[in-house]
Amino acid sequence: MPKPAPGFDDPLGLLRACHERILGHCDTLERLVSHLRRHGADQDAQLAAARILRYFQVGAPLHHEDEERDLFPALRAHSGFPAFQRAVLENLVVQHRELDTLWVQLEAALQAISRGAPADLPVQPFVALTRAHIAVEEQEIFPLAERYLDAAALGVLGRVMQARRQI
């Protein structure tokens, strides 16, 4: 049986689960490029494009907000947070804007595919930056969050994330 997804009482687990979904969609994007070459924008391609669109139009922006408005500021505010990691946080925010820009190009192509129209998918820049970005968050930032954010701070983070989603 698959393990249940983390809830808002485990905000870092929830962010990690979001990363897993994002990486899964990146894998799908890469497979979709090959699929389109072989089969065009058939029903399978249309469904895959629609699923990717749905996630990145709703889930990904919320994820970025969770990090930029709540997680990163909580880390910056902690007196023990290493000074050199502040630049890493700023770079991650810059990368969010870069991903937003890359997404706009990808989104237009996915919308066309979801309607059955042929389109070139410029996936590589988006997928490469996404994977690199997630690696930094998973390997550097989340371990620091586990170290520096206490149960109260994590509780606030989880409640804000839940409210953002109006759940």
Image (cartoon, rainbow, N blue to C red):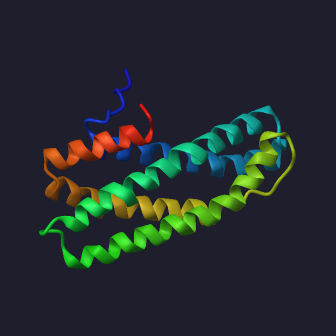
Look at 28% across and 47% down and name the residue there. Answer: 157
- Quadrant holding the C terminus: top left
Please indicate whether residue 31 sits to the left or right of residue 82 in the image. Answer: right
Image location of residue 92, percent across then percent down:
41, 68
Image location of residue 153, percent across then percent down:
19, 49
Look at 22% across and 46% down and name the residue there. Answer: 154
Q: Is residue 39 visible?
A: yes
Q: Is residue 23 visible?
A: no
User: Where 130 falls versus 33 (above or below)?
Assistant: below
Look at 62% across and 40% down and name the residue there. Answer: 54
Image location of residue 21, percent across then percent down:
48, 42
- Quadrant holding the N terminus: top left
- Which of the two residues, 131 or 115, is positioned nearer the viewer here? 115
Please indicate whether residue 108 sits to the left or right of residue 143 in the image. Answer: right
Please indicate whether residue 110 sits to the left or right of residue 55 in the image. Answer: right
Look at 43% across and 44% down and name the residue there. Answer: 18
User: Where 17 falls versus 84 (above or below)?
Assistant: above
